[in-house]
Image: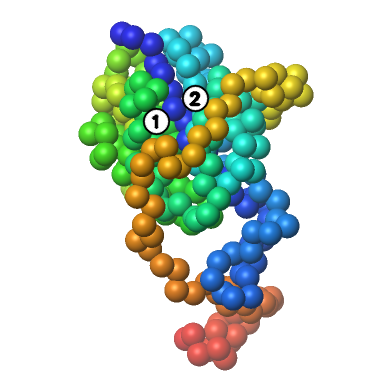
């Protein structure tokens, strides 16, 4: 078979360790002055692409991609420090991109860069849409496997294990293919200082969204964003009788 040419889309999101706050207008989560990092599911995707190469699979090239504000360059450099060979940044400062917008841009990148494998997170932790991978596979007419917990490639055949309700499912398909990653797939490496320095010299191409001719009409409207209701604190009981009494007191029995 020909070599594997991997595309790994990555997204800049609020760091998973930061507690999100709703802005005063209740239109979105506050992003100003908040720590951002790479979407955790995308870290898994970069790691898996690098591991394919380390397992002596014929990986020709690992291309990291991100669409969004200028600061998204930071996570592309992180992706390259983890092992990606180069990056493409499509700059879009004006508006939040919807999953379909991103999928259409990715379709163009796949075609221009002659990719035959796309590995991306099953969702991003900011909007939890979980749609981009499936939309991309549909636009390309490729096979897809979602929520992968194990990926094996032999020749041009890809075997993907995924956890489903009630068990484990194994899928087989031939490249080209779109795979979305789940948390059980691997444990992403930390980028070493030497690799961080090397990443600064790796190619990073900047492009404008206009170059792809994508219609960015908003199809979704956020009506309101609110904080979740405050949960009441729990209590302790001494024994089963105490628990039953408490449940009766609360009207649960």
Residue at x 43%, y 31% (from the top left corner):
119
Viewer-side residue, 187 vs 207 = 207
For the question of whether residue 122 can be seen, the reply is: no
- Give the label on residue 109, or none: 1
Q: Is residue 67 above or below residue 21?
A: above
For the question of whether residue 208 can be seen, the reply is: yes
Residue at x 26%, y 25% (from the top left corner):
173
Q: Is residue 178 above or below residue 56?
A: below
Viewer-side residue, 245 vs 29 = 29
- Give the label on residue 63, or none: 2
Horizontal and vertical percent for residue 126?
A: 53, 55
Q: Secondary structure at mark 1?
A: helix
The residues bearing labels 1 and 2 have C-alpha atoms spaced at a distance of: 10 Å
Q: Secondary structure at mark 2?
A: strand
Q: Which residue extends farthest left?
A: 141
Splitting the image into 4 quarters, where does residue 83 fall?
top right
Give the quadrant of the N terminus: top left
Viewer-side residue, 242 vs 10 = 10
Q: Is residue 33 left or right of residue 112?
A: right
Q: Is residue 202 above or below residue 40?
A: above
Q: If you read the primary sequence from the N terminus, does the residue marked by circle 1 or circle 2 appear first?
A: 2
């Amino acid at each position: 078979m020909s070599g594997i040419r991997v595309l790994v889309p990555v997204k800049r999101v609020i760091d998973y360790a930061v507690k999100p706050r709703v802005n005063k207008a209740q239109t979105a989560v506050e992003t100003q002055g908040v720590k951002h990092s790479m979407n955790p599911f995308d870290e898994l995707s970069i790691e898996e692409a690098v591991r394919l190469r380390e397992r002596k699979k014929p990986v020709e090239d690992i291309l990291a991609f991100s669409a969004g504000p200028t600061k998204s360059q930071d996570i592309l450099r992180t992706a390259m420090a983890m092992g990606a060979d180069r990056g493409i940044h499509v700059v879009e400062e004006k508006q939040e991109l919807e999953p379909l917008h991103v999928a259409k841009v990715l379709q163009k990148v796949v075609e221009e860069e002659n990719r035959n494998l796309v590995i991306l997170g099953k969702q991003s932790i900011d909007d939890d849409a979980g749609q981009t991978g499936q939309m991309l596979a549909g636009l390309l007419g490729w096979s897809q496997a979602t929520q992968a917990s194990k990926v094996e490639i032999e020749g041009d055949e890809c075997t993907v294990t995924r956890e489903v309700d009630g068990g484990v499912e194994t899928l087989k398909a031939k490249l080209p293919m779109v795979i979305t990653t789940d948390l059980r797939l691997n444990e992403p490496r930390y980028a070493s200082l030497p690799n961080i320095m090397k990443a600064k010299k790796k190619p990073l191409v900047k492009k404008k969204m206009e170059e792809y001719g994508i219609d960015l009409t908003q199809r979704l409207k956020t009506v309101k964003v609110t904080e979740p209701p405050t949960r009441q604190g729990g209590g302790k009981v001494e024994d089963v009788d105490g628990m039953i009494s408490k449940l009766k007191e609360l009207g649960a029995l």
